[in-house]
Image: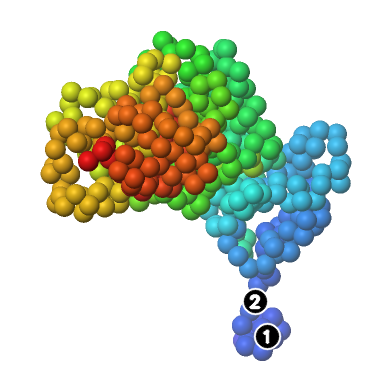
């Protein structure tokens, strides 16, 4: 009887296993669970499910992929909506809010670290993915507002971390106020009294669409004591870190752009020289050390030095196009002229402002050929001094739109300008073409020319 019972049990087990293994390949396949399946199966996430279905993101999160989802429950949605209905949120806005909770890779709690990562929401004008700031110093906090309450809910296409609040779309102010490495900037920009610019409003406005070059705390330490600066000057320095338009790092090229700082009491925006030959630097003094912190209203690039207001010397030294001009201005036999100090004179102090017609390196190379000289040192002191003086107009900031046809007085005498043709004719009837205009500094303006202006030979 005992043997009979054992055999009967064995038969039943074989039949049971066979009945559970009727796939064509003869293997047992357990039920799958995607992120969308988990949300649909938990009543605490019915609001999230409704939002995913309305935006058709439930299809995305039910498919293949590697996602990390910070999942707000019904209470979080109720708090976020504040009495409004989910249907009141425009579908395109709701989709971006939801994507702001989704990373494109699977990141478990042990893999999270303090710093920025990229989510699947996008900034409208550039199409760049938005940033998320994660702080793990005390639990896990997302963008300073939402805390992970349950971590590492594993699914077949990623991981879910339950969070306490819906994570609003971030503005630039979100990151500047939140990032401890930008606390000095946040303090100066938002607490200084007397600014005509409301920097907090600019950084939080939906339609700002700007690029912020954000000096880190060490940059402000290196700058030194700013308590003695006039409020207006400090405001202009901050505005000199803001470029119109959203320029992610891949869009930046070696070129000039304009900041929101202005020349004197005019509306002429100051220029800024961007160099991307090795990393990204600005005006030759400040390098990007963390790029592409993307918000809904702009992009932040952290920089390692405060970008002070540029002089015409700033641009001459930063732009390699003018390396021969700088070499000429600083040649030992030109020390008595002290061009660097003169051209660094602050605006409003004589002889500033300046209008500088700056020959390019190619222009100097052509000059050496013309003079049968092998190098800049072959040009005698008197000729070089007279030549350099012909390129500087003192006491005037003459932009391209202000340039008039006629004789123009320089430090070295008169030159003849044709504003219509954008040319300059020297005493030898040699013609220089103005090839770049309106590189605007705080104490003057530079126009690049393709031929060196010479005194009468």
Determine the secondary structure under disc 1.
Answer: loop
Q: Is residue 264 above or below residue 39?
A: above
The residue at which mark 1 appears reads as: 23
Answer yes or no: do the residues labelled 2 and 1 have beta carbons within 8 Å? Answer: yes
Q: Residues within 10 Å of mark 2 (few under 14, many from 20)?
A: few
On-image quarter of the C terminus: top left
Q: Relative to 369, is 403 on the left or the right?
A: right
Residue 23 figure quarter: bottom right
Please identify the residue farthest to the top as the structure is shown: 228
Quick one: 83 or 400, which is closer to the camera?
400
Q: Is residue 3 above or below residue 114?
A: below
Colour mode?
A: rainbow
Determine the secondary structure under disc 2.
Answer: loop
Q: Relative to 190, is 325 on the left or the right?
A: left
Q: Is residue 206 above or below residue 106?
A: above
Image coordinates of residue 98 in percent, x first then y, are 70, 49
Image coordinates of residue 14 in percent, x first then y, are 65, 85
| Distance from the alpha carbon under mark 2 to that under mark 1 | 8 Å
Q: Which mark is residue 262?
A: none
Quick one: 347 or 57, which is closer to the camera?
347
Quick one: 274 or 432, which is closer to the camera?
432
Q: Residues within 10 Å of mark 1 (few under 14, many from 20)?
A: few
Q: Which mark is residue 29?
A: 2
């Amino acid at each position: 009887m005992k043997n009979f019972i054992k055999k009967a049990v064995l038969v039943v087990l074989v039949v049971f296993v066979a009945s559970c293994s009727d796939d064509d390949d003869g293997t047992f396949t357990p039920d799958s669970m995607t992120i969308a399946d988990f949300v649909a199966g938990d009543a605490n996430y019915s609001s999230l499910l409704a939002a995913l279905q309305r935006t058709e993101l439930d299809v995305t999160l039910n498919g293949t992929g590697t996602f990390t989802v910070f999942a707000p429950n019904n209470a979080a949605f109720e708090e976020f909506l504040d009495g409004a209905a989910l249907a009141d949120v425009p579908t395109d806005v709701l989709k971006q809010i939801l994507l702001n909770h989704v990373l494109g890779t699977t990141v478990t709690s042990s893999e999270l670290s303090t710093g920025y990562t990229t989510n699947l929401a996008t900034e409208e004008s550039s199409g760049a993915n938005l940033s998320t700031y994660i702080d793990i110093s005390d639990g896990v906090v997302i963008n300073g507002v939402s805390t992970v309450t349950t971590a590492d809910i594993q699914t077949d296409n990623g991981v879910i971390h339950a969070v306490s609040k819906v994570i609003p779309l971030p503005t630039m102010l979100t990151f500047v106020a939140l990032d401890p490495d930008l606390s000095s900037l946040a303090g100066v920009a938002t607490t200084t009294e007397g600014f005509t610019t409301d920097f907090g409003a600019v950084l939080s406005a939906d339609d700002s669409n700007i690029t912020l070059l954000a000096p880190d705390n060490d940059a402000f330490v290196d700058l030194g004591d700013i308590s003695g600066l006039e409020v207006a000057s400090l405001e202009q320095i901050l505005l000199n870190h803001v470029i119109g338009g959203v320029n992610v790092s891949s869009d930046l090229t070696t070129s000039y752009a304009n900041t929101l700082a202005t020349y004197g009491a005019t509306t002429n925006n100051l220029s800024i020289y961007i160099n991307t030959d090795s990393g990204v630097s600005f005006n030759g003094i400040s390098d990007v050390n963390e790029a592409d912190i993307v918000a809904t209203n702009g992009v932040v690039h952290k920089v390692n030095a405060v970008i002070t207001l540029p002089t015409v010397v700033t641009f001459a030294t930063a732009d390699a196009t003018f390396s021969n001009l700088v070499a000429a201005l600083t040649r030992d036999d030109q020390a008595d002229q002290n061009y660097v100090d003169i051209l660094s004179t602050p605006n409003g102090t004589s002889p500033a402002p300046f209008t500088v017609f700056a020959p390019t390196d190619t222009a100097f190379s052509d000059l050496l050929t013309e003079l049968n000289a092998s190098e800049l040192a072959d040009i005698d002191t008197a000729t070089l001094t007279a030549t350099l003086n012909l390129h500087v107009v003192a006491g005037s900031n003459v932009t391209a739109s202000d340039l008039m046809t006629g004789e123009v007085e320089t430090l070295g005498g008169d030159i003849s300008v044709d504003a219509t043709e954008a040319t300059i004719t020297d005493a030898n009837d040699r013609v220089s073409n103005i090839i770049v205009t309106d590189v605007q500094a705080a104490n003057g303006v530079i126009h690049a020319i393709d031929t060196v202006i010479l005194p009468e030979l």
